[in-house]
Image: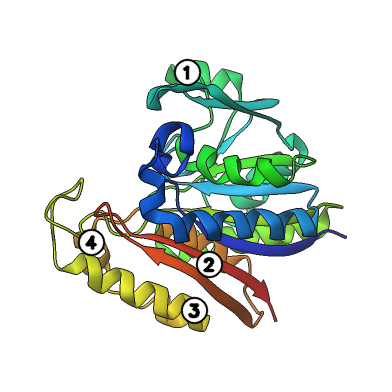
Amino acid sequence: MGKVLGAYLMPHPPIIIPEIGRGEESKIINTVKAMDKIACDIAEKRPDTIIIISPHGTLFRDAISIMGSPVLKGDFGQFRAKNIIIEKENDIELAGEIDGEAWSKGIPAVLMDKDRLDEYGLEGNLDHGALVPLYFVEKEYKQYKLVHLTYGLLSQSELYNFGKVLYSCIEKSDRNTVLIASGDLSHKLTKDAPAGYHPSGKIFDGILMDLLGKGDVEGIFSIDTSLANSAGECGLRSVEILLGAFDGFEINAEVLSYEGPFGVGYGTVKIDAG
């Protein structure tokens, strides 16, 4: 029987990688340290499979995307660091089980195998939402298969229930697994932020980080949708899926860091079941 060994919220700013940041990463040094700490924690757990939920893969409005290629590969070429490459074996069996059980529970999912990728004219490369967290993991631990998911623009209940599907499929497998919810918080913290400034940014980030630190699942799902939308975040849906995988468990959460010097909120959180 498989186990969920733990879960993490990890941001994905490419600037955090030295070859890309070229010194700018020093401005978010607490985030760097937190990402390194998470990588060491994962190495200690030695999972067979890592499931990563990204906002930046193949995004469908009406379905969750599951990468189905035998090998999952990507690089940082779009950030002028093409020599940094991550290549992992896809846990195809587990990915297929997740796809099948999602449909059996009425949750639309798409397994992006070669035929589907060709249909949509896609290459199926790992996106930076996955690459940045895995860059840190790879420094400490490499002996894992990968399952890559991209959330769909589904309802909160569908996302939460998909998280329950993840737990069910892991439990029925022989995989010891960790979950990574990749996501940045508000992109509107300052006037020079990438998406411009909105006062909701700091409010949203403060509320979400506080609720995560308390393990307050009900509170997180009660966050006003208009607040999240106006904050310009990309991590809440990843978190909602992750929390579904802990349905029925008491959550022990530790906020490792929060920073936003570039106008985007970067939060790192470690979560274990009680």
Looking at the rendered structure, the kind of residue marked 3 is Gly
Q: Earlier in the sequence, mark 4 or mark 1?
A: 1
User: Pointer 2: what residue?
Assistant: 269
1 vs 2, front mark: 2
Tell me if residue 126 comes above or below residue 252 in the rendering. above
Which residue is identified by label 3? 213
**Label at residue 119:** 1
**Mark whose residue sits in front, 2 or 4:** 2
SS label for mark 4: helix
Q: Pointers 2 and 3 in contact (CB under 8 A)? A: yes
182 vs 68, left or right, is left
Q: Residue at x 42, y 33 (%)?
A: 20
Q: Amino acid at mark 2?
A: Val
Where residue 139 sits, quadrant-wise, is top right
Instruction: Find disc 4 in the rendering and name its residue.
Output: 231
The type of residue carrying mark 4 is: Ala
Work out whether 116 lies above or below 192. Answer: above
Relative side of 135 to 76, left or right: right
Upstream in sequence: badge 1 or badge 2: 1
